[in-house]
Amino acid sequence: MSVRLNPIFDKTKLDEKEGMSVEDQTVLKIVPSGFLKQDAGHRIAPLPFKPYKPFLENSKQIAHHRTKSFDMNLGWNSERRTHVVDKVAKNSRLVLEAFQSDDLAIKLKDLDLGLADLPIQMSLGLSWDTELDEFTFRVFSDNKPFIRRGVLSTVNTLYDPIGFATPVIIKGKLVMRQMLSSSSTYHWDDPFPESLNQQWELSVPSLSQLEHLPTPRKYNGPSFTSSVK
């Protein structure tokens, strides 16, 4: 009897290995035949993983219909319209012409969209040249005193949440760190030592040059068709 039961309780190296679920087995069957690579380099996959392909309606027509219905709804509800449509500014003249003048940004209301250049708009704190579709920097050239308050004001004048101007701003911040890490304690209106003034004066002109450094708003990588393997 013991001879017959021993093989039942013997362990093998595969005993602790988890078996594949039914879903995992289904995916492994679909991947070899369902995932395809087109001539242009695009890869297509059967989503969702079903034995049949669901019918997908024309999304362009659906989007146009819903947009039209949404616009009509805003026309009936003036309060909601003021909440949704507020200071519209786009870099496409065709898009701007589709809006009523009351819905446009103040600088665009009385502008001849067919002839005049589009002005620079403020978008989330950034200066946006809508004509060239580029971000620009507005630098205030006021000469600040060489004190803690003045240096901080100069360095923090530029609003750069994405970090475009970091290579330039970092110079001023390094000077600021060197000043504050010294053994002396500087209050807001205490002058910094002249030994650091020359280093600071060399970094300030770089800030004003940022006005001539436009940054494209759109980041377009190479398309699949133009990529070379």
Image (cartoon, rainbow, N blue to C red):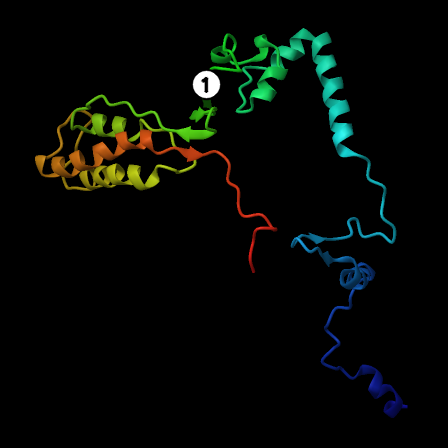
Residue at 82 percent across and 36 percent down: it is 57
* Vertical order, 76 against 2 (above or below): above
Q: Which residue type carries mark 1?
A: Asp
- Return the residue found at the far bottom: 3
Q: Is residue 161 visible?
A: no
Question: Along the horizontal axis of the image, is 136 left or right of 2?
Answer: left
* Vertical order, 105 against 176 (above or below): above
- Residue 27 % position (x, y): 78, 60
Which quadrant of the structure image shows residue 29? bottom right
Question: Along the horizontal axis of the image, is 38 left or right of 131?
Answer: right
- Residue 176 % position (x, y): 22, 37
Residue at 32 percent across and 29 percent down: it is 211
* Residue that numbered label 1 is attached to: 117
- Residue 18 % position (x, y): 74, 68
- Return the residue found at the far right: 1
Residue at 22 percent across and 32 percent down: it is 205
Question: Along the horizontal axis of the image, is 149 left or right of 159?
Answer: left
Quadrant housing the C terminus: bottom right
- Residue 7 % position (x, y): 83, 87
Question: Along the horizontal axis of the image, is 148 left or right of 157?
Answer: left
Quadrant housing the N terminus: bottom right
